[in-house]
Amino acid sequence: MNSKQMVGEKAAEYVEDGMIVGLGTGSTAYYLVEALGRRVRAGLRIVGVTTSSRTKAQAEAVGIPLADLNDVMQIDLTIDGADEISKDFQGIKGGGGALLFEKMVADHSKQVIWIVDDSKMVQKLGEFPLPVEVVSFGHQQLIRLFEAKGYHPQLRLGNEGQPYVTDGGHYIIDLHLKVIEHPQKLAAWLDGLTGVVEHGLFLDQVNTVIIGHENGIEEVSAR
């Protein structure tokens, strides 16, 4: 069993009968959904709220009942992966392109758990490119702005070299920053840009991080 599977299955143990559960997106969250599917088939009663079309299809395939985010008052627990987590438990997410829906689901959750292997734990954020989800109209203007800032932007491409399109119908510009010294300041600046829909800085959000190491699992309380 690899570390991603270990942490995914461990996180599934946090889910209790009767919960509304936010289901993340990505290679680690895949194992969580598979584990929850087995528990549902064994009698666990939950309702899932998915963060992407990929997770929705997987959850339906393993028999997890689903609800739309519009139709729940609050989510009890969201479990998701992360692309980077700093020593003070700030995160970058969105490598899989689901950052907008992931953040919306997390923002309406009582508790958030991130599940990662230890390669995702860093001192400071920034080595992983920061995704910025933008409207397609005028996106080149944002690229020029990011270039002028020295942020080394790159429009994410999908199949056949065409711009990658998110489930929300937007483009993603990845910023190659190397180190983010002031995540809150950068997040506030990005939040204020017209045309930016969302960004991949997930700040002051996670409650528990489950980390997979070569020799086992570590569970850390983040706040």
Image (cartoon, grey):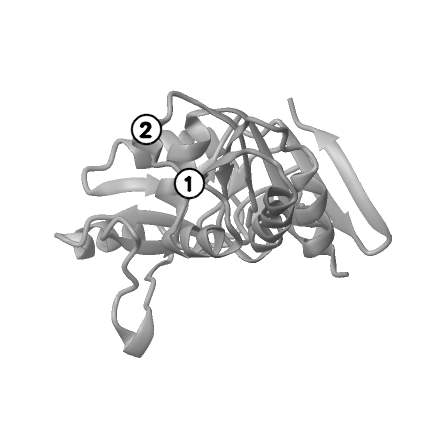
Instruction: Please rate how many residues cluster around mark 2, counting C-alpha atoms within 10 Å: few if below 14, some from 14 to 19, many from 20.
Output: few
For residue 180, which numbered disc appears in the image? none
The residue at the far left in this view is: 137
| CA distance separating discs 1 and 2 | 10 Å
Residue ID for mark 1: 66
Q: Is residue 129 left or right of residue 153?
A: right
State whether residue 150 is above or below residue 70. below
Secondary structure beneath dot 1 equals loop
Whole-percent x and y of residue 193?
24, 37
Residue 43 visible somewhere in the drawing: yes
The residue shown at (35%, 33%) is: 69
The quadrant holding residue 176 is bottom left
The residue at the far right in this view is: 215
The quadrant holding residue 154 is bottom left
Whole-percent x and y of residue 34?
60, 53
Whole-percent x and y of residue 169?
23, 53
State whether residue 147 is above or below residue 221. below
The residue shown at (82%, 56%) is: 214
Q: Tell how many labels.
A: 2
Query: Which amino acid, by three-letter code, is at mark 2?
Result: Asp
Query: Which amino acid, by three-letter code, is at mark 1?
Result: Leu
Q: Is residue 177 left or right of residue 156?
A: right
First in sequence, mark 1 or 2: give its number. 1
Whole-percent x and y of residue 67?
38, 36
Near-viewer residue (163 or 33): 33
The quadrant holding residue 197 is top left
Residue ID for mark 2: 71
**Dot 1 and dot 2 residues touching (CB under 8 Å):** no
The residue shown at (79%, 45%) is: 217
Residue 186 visible somewhere in the drawing: no
